[in-house]
Amino acid sequence: MSKFKKKKKGLPAVNTAALPDIVFMLLFFFMVTTTMRETDLRIENPRLPSATEIKKLEDKSLVSTIYVGKSKDPERDGVGYNKIQLNDKIASADQVPAFIFSKRDKLAEAMHPFMTTSIKADKESNVGTITDIRLKLRDVNALKISYSTQKGSNQ
Amino acid sequence: MARRENPEINAGSMADIAFLLLIFFLVTTTMNVDSGISKKLSEKPPQDYVPPVIKEKNILEVVINRNNELLVENERTELKDLKELAKKFIDNGGGVGKPGEDGSPGKPCDYCKGEKSEASSDHPNKAIISVQSDRGTEYGTYITVQNELLRAYSELRNRLSKERYGVSYDELEQQFQDAKKSAELKGRVDELRKKVEDIKISYPQIISDAEPTSS
């Protein structure tokens, strides 16, 4: 008779054994898709202008990014929205060709025409700065550029 | 009788560890793809380069001054009117187009719906939009102007594509991109490329950046 004793009543605990699996799955997803920011911004995060006719930049390895905006450290770099950042430091437009060459060195010769320069400039930067960069890019035959913008709405 | 201990590792905190890592990656992750207005610069002209003479009527002059004000063909214009002006200019079709590469004479624009005015552009492939800005112009304004001009082109392209192929140019381009990627649509790639090229050539985007003024 004791074998058929009534089972103890009580709230059965929810089985959480599969919880780690679910969380790990999410974790791996984010680990795979994540891209760490590879450069430290010396300028304040540029407020990109918005536009509607935009194209996505396909291949990240073919893109070199030039930032233009306001320096985080005005005492050292000066004020204004026209500071150019190449790699990790504030530079001038004259250093753009060297920057492009260093990017080119990492890629095969055949890929050079497909390289794109993405200009991430603040809304309040001046066209003059952008033009200086553009002229330098033209000098070294880096002809594909992309003005980075956010997706805006049709007014 | 000694009770056998069930050797089980307590995995209760595993979830906590995983959550911690998960939250770290959630915070550091940046999913945004870089996107923007793409542009192809012209090559550096040789030293002794003489620019070709272009008829005044084939150029739409857009000037942005240092106070971010807009001047189209020497008249003050609001930004919201720029697109319509550009469309009217591109789509005018008042004369014959560029001669073909094989030397065939230029044809008049048979798909244009413009006024065919003598005073405006001859053909979409001759119509040049020249944007001149000041060095002090704000970048945001400059981009908005470029965007409006591109919108004018894409609206014209969409219209023509709808007429010729029944789908808008955006969809056509999307289909082309999809076809390039997938294996079973391989047969359609050439057909779609032809269509895309056809629309592109019909309304080529000719936006030139003039040297900025520095007053």
Image (spheres, coloured by chain):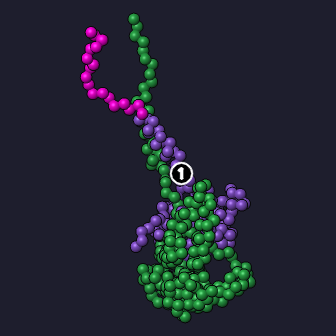
Chain colours: A purple, B green
Extreme bottom residue here? B118
Q: Chain of mark 1?
A: A
Q: How many marks?
A: 1
Residue A2 among those drawn in magenta = yes
Q: Is residue B172 left or right of residue B20?
A: right
Q: Main secondary structure of the magenta part?
A: loop
Vertical placement of A149 versus B124: above or below? above
Between A149 and A28, the one lying in front of the other is A28
Q: Which residue is rendered at x = 44% and y = 85% of the image?
A: B77
Residue where numbered disc 1 is placed: A35
Residue B21 position in % (x across, y down): 46, 41
Residue A134 is drawn in which quadrant? bottom right
Q: Is residue B181 left or right of residue B50?
A: left
Query: Is residue B61 something that shows in the picture?
Result: no
Vertical placement of A52 versus A26: above or below? below
Q: Which residue is rendered at x = 40% and y = 7% of the image?
A: B2
Q: Range of the magenta residues?
A: A1-18
SS category of the residue bearing label 1: loop
Query: Is residue B188 something that shows in the picture?
Result: yes
Residue A28 position in % (x across, y down): 50, 42
Q: Is residue A16 left or right of residue B210?
A: left
Residue A10 among those drawn in magenta = yes
Give the amino acid at mark 1. Thr
Q: Which residue is rendered at x = 70% and y = 79% of the image?
A: B45
Instruction: For label 1, count other residues whose C-alpha is less than 10 Å away and answer few (under 14), some (14-19) or many (20+).
Output: some
Residue A83 position in % (x across, y down): 54, 67
Between B167 and B86, the one lying in front of the other is B167
Q: Which residue is rendered at x = 63% and y = 86% of the image?
A: B107
Vertical placement of B172 versus B112: above or below? above
Name the quarter where the C terminus of chain B is drawn.
bottom right
